[in-house]
Image (cartoon, grey):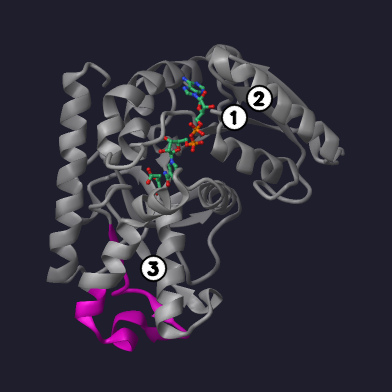
């Protein structure tokens, strides 16, 4: 190992996503098979013992790329020198709750963590917020970190993107590897809009290939948007392995780039593109290259899409107002 290890901080390390995530990071799947990583695990005091257990198991894997593990309940230590921060630790929703119901419970976590990132993280810090409501939690963390460029705070909609890929693959009988340019717009919530109008399946326009607006409106969109609730109903607990997988995908793509001719979906601070008010952390189609991302420009938005994007953006604006009211931003 000759390269300096990349410091990766994971919050909520003892939780179910943490358990599915840490082994993949340590094995090299997050950043690349030649990139050593040093893990920093942040937990609340009650979670420290379980995090230590997970660290013992990580040791027992003897991962060649894992250069060290530190466990702490102090955000200032956890984010010291962090290059990548995965903010997972939060209270998950249970049956009957919407993700927005978690705003107050989880908002208080992200403000101090944003400040600790502001004060201690490395200059190249990249932040992914997974903990729900992810978009608005990312906004809270970002607002508490005025010295960090705003675009480094992102929220996870890659799980929604992957869910949409899988549903479209099943419907069209096309392998996911032959589907490109799918987009999740808006909030990681039931109002999100998975858009196939610009997507391609095996080189053909996906909406034309499907040619069934009823399926789109009544099956595809609700299935993707309500998949989190369906998993909770079936498993009795929220998505964990698929969420960890999406977090790995999100950071891997951000660092290593999107394939030529394709894009991905990320919750990122709006620059006003597509009529999304500036500053809201909303999901967009983005291309990544050289460790940075750009919102894909110039897509034509039809009426069907416009109404759905606007509805999700309206919800994000309401969440922003709510956290303003709580003094979190
Ligand atoms: N954006 C997305 O697509 C998805 C987001 N999620 C969200 O991810 C979050 C975590 O989910 P799970 O791992 O299933 O929950 P979990 O309850 O199994 O684990 C959460 C962990 O976070 C820890 N924690 C709580 N407050 C903390 C703090 N201030 N600092 C550090 N650690 C803290 C807890 O002790 C616990 O170990 C939830 O908010 C869930 O809703 C889950 C799936 C997908
Ligand atoms: O639905 C939840 O609460 C967990 C989550 O965000 C998802 O699975 O998309």
Report the residue at 31% width, 61% height from top: 297
Q: Residue 182 carries which label?
A: 3
Q: Can you tell me whether the CB of the residue at mark 1 lies under 8 Å from the nearest atom of ligand 1? A: yes
Q: Which mark is residue 47?
A: none
Do the residues bearing badges 1 and 2 touch, measured as CB atoms within 8 Å?
yes
- Please tell me how crowded label 1 is: few (under 14), some (14-19), or many (20+) other residues with Cα within 10 Å: many
Residue under label 2: 51
Q: Can you tell me whether the CB of the residue at mark 2 lies under 8 Å from the nearest atom of ligand 1? A: yes
Residue under label 1: 13
* Quadrant of residue 165 within the rendered picture: bottom left
- Please tell me how crowded label 3 is: few (under 14), some (14-19), or many (20+) other residues with Cα within 10 Å: many
Q: Where is residue 37 in the image (x, y as percent from the top left)?
A: 73, 35
- Please tell me how crowded label 2 is: few (under 14), some (14-19), or many (20+) other residues with Cα within 10 Å: many
Decide whether residue 213 is among the magenta residues: yes
Quick one: label 2 or label 3, which is nearer the N terminus? Answer: 2
**Which type of secondary structure does the marked residue at label 1 adopt?**
loop
Q: Give the range drawn in magenta.
A: 193-216
Q: Position of residue 56 (x, y in %)?
A: 78, 28
Asked if 49 appears above or below 207 in the picture, the reply is: above
């Amino acid at each position: 190992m000759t390269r300096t290890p990349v410091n990766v901080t994971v919050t909520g390390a003892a939780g179910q996503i943490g358990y599915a995530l840490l082994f993949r990071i340590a094995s090299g799947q997050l950043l690349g098979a030649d990139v050593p990583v040093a893990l920093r695990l942040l937990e609340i005091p009650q979670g420290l013992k379980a995090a230590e257990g997970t660290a013992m198991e990580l040791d027992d894997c003897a991962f060649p790329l894992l250069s060290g593990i530190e466990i702490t309940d102090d955000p200032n230590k956890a984010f010291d020198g962090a290059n990548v921060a995965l903010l997972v630790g939060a209270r998950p929703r249970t049956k009957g709750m919407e993700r927005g119901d978690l705003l107050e419970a989880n908002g208080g976590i992200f403000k101090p963590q944003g400040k600790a990132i502001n004060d201690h993280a490395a200059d190249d810090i990249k932040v992914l917020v997974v903990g729900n409501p992810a978009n608005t939690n990312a906004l809270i963390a970002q607002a508490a970190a005025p010295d960090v460029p705003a675009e480094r705070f992102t929220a996870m909609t890659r799980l929604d993107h992957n869910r949409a890929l899988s549903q479209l693959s099943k419907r069209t009988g096309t392998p996911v590897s032959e589907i490109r340019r799918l987009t999740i717009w808006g909030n990681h919530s039931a109002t999100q809009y998975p858009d196939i109008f610009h997507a391609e399946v095996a080189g053909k326009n996906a909406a034309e290939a499907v040619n069934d607006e009823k399926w789109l409106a009544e099956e595809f969109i609700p299935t993707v948007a309500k998949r989190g609730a369906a998993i909770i109903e079936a498993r009795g607990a929220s998505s964990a392995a698929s969420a960890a997988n999406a977090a790995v995908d999100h950071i891997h793509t951000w660092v290593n780039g999107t394939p030529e001719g394709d894009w991905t979906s990320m919750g990122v601070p709006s620059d006003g593109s597509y009529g999304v008010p500036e500053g809201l952390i909303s999901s967009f189609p983005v291309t990544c290259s050289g460790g940075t991302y750009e919102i894909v420009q110039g897509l034509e938005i039809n009426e069907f899409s416009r109404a759905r994007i606007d509805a999700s953006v309206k919800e994000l604006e309401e969440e922003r107002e709510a956290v303003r009211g709580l003094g979190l931003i």
